[in-house]
Amino acid sequence: MSEQLKPLGGVLDGVLERLSIIEAKLGISPGAALSAVAPAIVEDEEIHPRLVAYDEHIQRTLVPFTESCTALGSEMESVGASIGEVWDAVRGIVELGTKCKKPADVPTGLQPHLKPCQDAMAKIRSARIDRKFDWHLKAIMEMLACVSWVVMSLPPSPANFVKDTIGASDFWANKVRKEYKGNDKEGPAHVKFCDTMKAMVLDLSAYLKEYHLSGLAWNPHGKDLSDAKVGEASKPAAAAPKAAPTTAAAASAGSGAGIFTELKKKQTGDGTSAATGLKKVSRDQQTWRKEFKNPGGDVPKPTSAPVAAPKPAVAKFGAKKPLGPPKCEYQDRGCKWNVENQTKDTCEGGVCKVEVTDVKQQVYIYKCENVTIQIIGKCKSVILDSCTKCGVVFDNVISACEVVNCKRVQVQATGACPSFSIDKTDGIVVHLSNEAISVSSFVTSKSSEMNVSWPDDAGEIKEAPIPEQFMHKMVNGSVTSQVSDLYH
C-alpha cells in the first residue's frame, strides 16, 4: 500500500515547493492567510450594562475622591488607594452577578469572594496617620458601611441603605468642615474631601436604584456561584474602538464555521439558546404541502389543542399574606440583629431570646406575630417594624426604641431608655421601670390607643394614656397647641 502512495507523495511535495516559491515572490509569509481569517471569527466580548454603569460611577465619583485624598498628603493618599481597592473588589462581585445564578444563601456564597474587599478595609482600619486626620478617617469608616449592600436583603432596599450611611459619615465630615472653615490655605482641600465623599455615596445610591433595586442582581441562566473561582472577575479597562470588518471577516462570518461559532456564543451556561422553547409545527400547519395547493386535495384535520391547565385561584383583595421564613441572626456589617417572621410556633415557649454582646449592636424586629422578643444585654437601639400582638422586653438602650407600623404591641424597659418613637401604630403600651421614668421621652405621630405604665413610690402600677388629640389656637400671629381637655 505504501508503494502505491509514493507517486502521490512526490506530486504533493512538488505542489508545496511551487507554492513556497510563489509566496516568496509575493512577499507572503507562511500562515499569513490563516492569521488574517482567524481574528475575524473572534469578537470582543461585550461588557454587561451593569458593569459599564459601575465603571462610569467609578470614573465619575471615585477618581475625584481619591484625587482629593492625594491632595491632603501621602498618608491620606494611601487611604484613598485602599478605598479604590474596595470599589474594585465590589466591581468583581457585580461581575459575578452577571455570570452566576443567585445562591440559596448569598452571604455564605459570596464569603470567599469578599476577601479582597475585607483586606482593603482592614488596611484602612489599621492605618496609622496624623492625629489631624482622625475625623477624616472616622468619616471614611462610617461611609464604608455602604459596601454591605452586596450581601443584604430587603428591607430596606440597597439604595436607601447606602443613602442612610451619609448621616453617620456627615457627622464627622461636618466637624472637618467646621475645623477648616475660613482657612483659605488648607480649607478648600479638606472641604473638597468631604464633598467628593458624599457625592460618591449619593451616586452609588442612584446606581443601585437603577440596576440593583432589590439586592445584588444575578443571572438566572448563569453558572453556579460555587463553580466561580476567587479572583476570576476582570478589572475595569478602557473600551477599545472596534475595527471595521475586513473582507476576510465577512467571508468567515458567512461560512459554515462562522455560523456555528455564532450559535455557540449565543448559548448560555445551562445550554439554552435562541431556539430554546420554539414549538413544533404540526402537519396541518405546513401550508407548503400539496394538500393545501390542490383544490381537490384533502386538507388534514387540525390536531386538537392541548388542554390548558387550570389557573390557580387568585387571592382576594386584602387577604393576609403568609409570613416568610423565620430568621434570628446577627450581621457583622452594620452591627445589627435581624429578627424576622417569628411566631409563637417558631419559638420555644413563644419567647425569642436575643443576647446582645456589644453596646454598638442594634436589634431590628420585622413582621413578627404573637411572640415575645427578649433582648438580653445593653444595646444601641431597638426597632419594631410591622409587628402584630408582640411583646418586647429589653434591659438598657443607649439611643432610642422605635415602633413603626405596628398593631397591639407592648414594650417594656427594665432599665433605662432615653427616647421612645411611635409612628403609624394602633394600640401600644409602654412599661417603664423606676430607672426610666425620669429620663424617658415620647415622640408620636399618626398613632392611636397609646398608653404608658410605671410604678409609683408605693410600688403600685399606674397607667395613663398618651394624648393623641390636641387643640390649636392662633396667638399673636403664631399657632399654639395644648392637650385636649379629654386628658385632664
Image: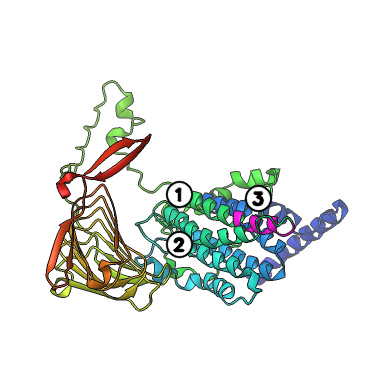
Q: In the rendered image, which residue does mark 1 sit on?
A: 209
Q: Residue at x 50, y 49 (%)?
A: 206
Left-right relation of 358 to 15? left
Cα separation between marks 2 and 3:
38 Å
In primary-sequence order, the first of circles 2 and 3 is: 3
As drawn, which residue projects farthest toward the right?
A: 25
Left-right relation of 61 to 217? right
Up-down: is 480 above or below 260? Answer: above
In primary-sequence order, the first of circles 1 and 3 is: 3
User: Which dot marks residue 478?
Assistant: none
- SS assignment at label 2: helix
Cα separation between marks 1 and 3:
39 Å
**Residue 133 seen in this snapshot:** yes
Q: Position of residue 118 (x, y in %)?
A: 52, 72
As drawn, which residue projects farthest toward the left?
A: 460
User: Which dot marks residue 150?
Assistant: 2
- SS assignment at label 1: helix
Q: Amino acid at mark 1?
A: Lys
Q: In the rendered image, which residue does mark 3 sit on?
A: 40
Q: Nearer the viewer, residue 269 or 238?
A: 238
Q: Position of residue 133 (x, y in %)?
A: 63, 69
Q: Quadrant of residue 459?
A: bottom left
Whether residue 339 is in magenta: the answer is: no
- Crowding near pointer 3: few (<14 within 10 Å), some, many (20+)? some
Q: Quadrant of residue 341?
A: bottom left
- Crowding near pointer 1: few (<14 within 10 Å), some, many (20+)? some
Q: Position of residue 395 (x, y in %)?
A: 27, 74
Q: Amino acid at mark 2?
A: Val
Up-down: is 185 above or below 244? Answer: below
Q: Nearer the viewer, residue 212 or 387?
A: 387
Left-right relation of 344 to 46? left
